[in-house]
Amino acid sequence: MQTNKKSFGKRTIPIIFSIALLFVGPLAFAQKDSTLFFRSAVSVTQNGFSFIPSFSLGKPAAILDIGVGNKRLSFEPQFRFALEGKPWSFIFIYRYKVVNKSKFQFTVGGHIPAIVFKTQTISTSSGVNDVIISQRFIAGELIPNYQVAKNISISLYLLQGYGFQSHATRYTSFAGLRSNFSNVKLSERLYIKWVPQIFYLKTDDQDGVYVTYHFTFAMKNFPLSISHILNKSIQTSIVAKDFDWNVSLIYSFDKNYVRR
């Protein structure tokens, strides 16, 4: 038992220290920006997808995405619930653009923390009851992005996560190569967004390769949109669905504010 505690400390401290450095520097040295954005999106779907698309809730869910920040620094939490009212996962994401050029952006981020909720059946003196338990994670992310054309970009998404519970996944590694085709006009008002991705995922001793795409239909100056996600494994040893999909109805709000 003593050996496990020492190993836990040796592995955890460098991870926490590294993620903390991602934000201490930017907060200390970032220039003030007079422009502040606030955006939010509420989506309802028949099958809730996790932050990592290999995992899904398998039943209807509601997801709240919030983003607030300026050109460099942002706070982008995500809250997922089953439609029956039970919390599913909360992720508190902080991001900072180290490089923010017209053609190239490089973003560092951290999930501090990410919380996953599970329902567990326990026996008590009053009988058998369901209780909700939480599992805590932290993660760091690196996102280089290159703007190929006005509405086309290519990015690499790298994530390394650590779980604090011995009975859950301890180490998660994710590497995804994605393209982003945004604001592709179908008519004067109707446009689509298409994000295909191939990614590698490792959870402790299991790993897999997957392809996924995120397809959105939207209208200009209209808050409602329809989104479709599809995920398919190429080769994997991870216990999850080999093929999964969902359809979501999304209400979005997006505003920019300028300090005078």
Image (cartoon, rainbow, N blue to C red):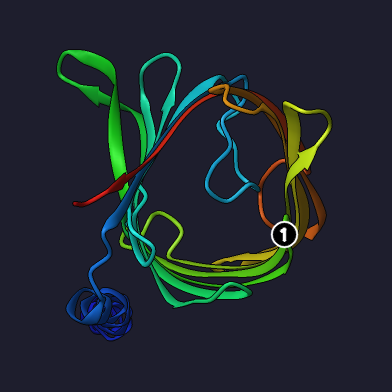
Left or right, residue 45 beside residue 115: right
Q: Give me the residue at 46% from left, 59% from top.
A: 169
Which kind of residue does numbered mark 1 sit on?
Lys
> Residue 152: horizontal and vertical position, in percent?
75, 59
From the viewer's side, name the closer residue of 33 and 108: 33
From the viewer's side, name the closer residue of 19 and 116: 19
Q: Give me the residue at 57% from left, 26% from top.
A: 221
> Residue 120: horizontal and vertical position, in percent?
36, 31
Quarter placement of the N terminus:
bottom left
User: In this rendering, is residue 130 above or below 232?
Assistant: above
Res. 249 visible in picture:
no
Q: Residue furthest front?
A: 260
> Residue 94: horizontal and vertical position, in percent?
33, 60
Left or right, residue 90 beside residue 44: left
Res. 254 visible in picture:
yes
SS for callout 1? loop
Q: Give me the residue at 36% from left, 17% from top.
A: 85
Q: Choose top left, top right, bottom left or bottom right for residue 131.
A: top left
User: In this rendering, is residue 113 above or below 252?
Assistant: below
Left or right, residue 249 beside residue 190: left
Q: Choose top left, top right, bottom left or bottom right for residue 245.
A: top right
From the viewer's side, name the closer residue of 224 and 9: 224
Label 1 crowd (10 A; few <14 / some 14-19 / many >=20): few
Pointer 1 residue: 150
Q: Residue furthest left?
A: 125
Q: Choose top left, top right, bottom left or bottom right for residue 34.
A: bottom left
Q: Give me the residue at 72% from left, 59% from top.
A: 150
User: In this rendering, is residue 99 above or below 227?
Assistant: below
Disc count in the image?
Answer: 1
> Residue 210: horizontal and vertical position, in percent?
76, 56
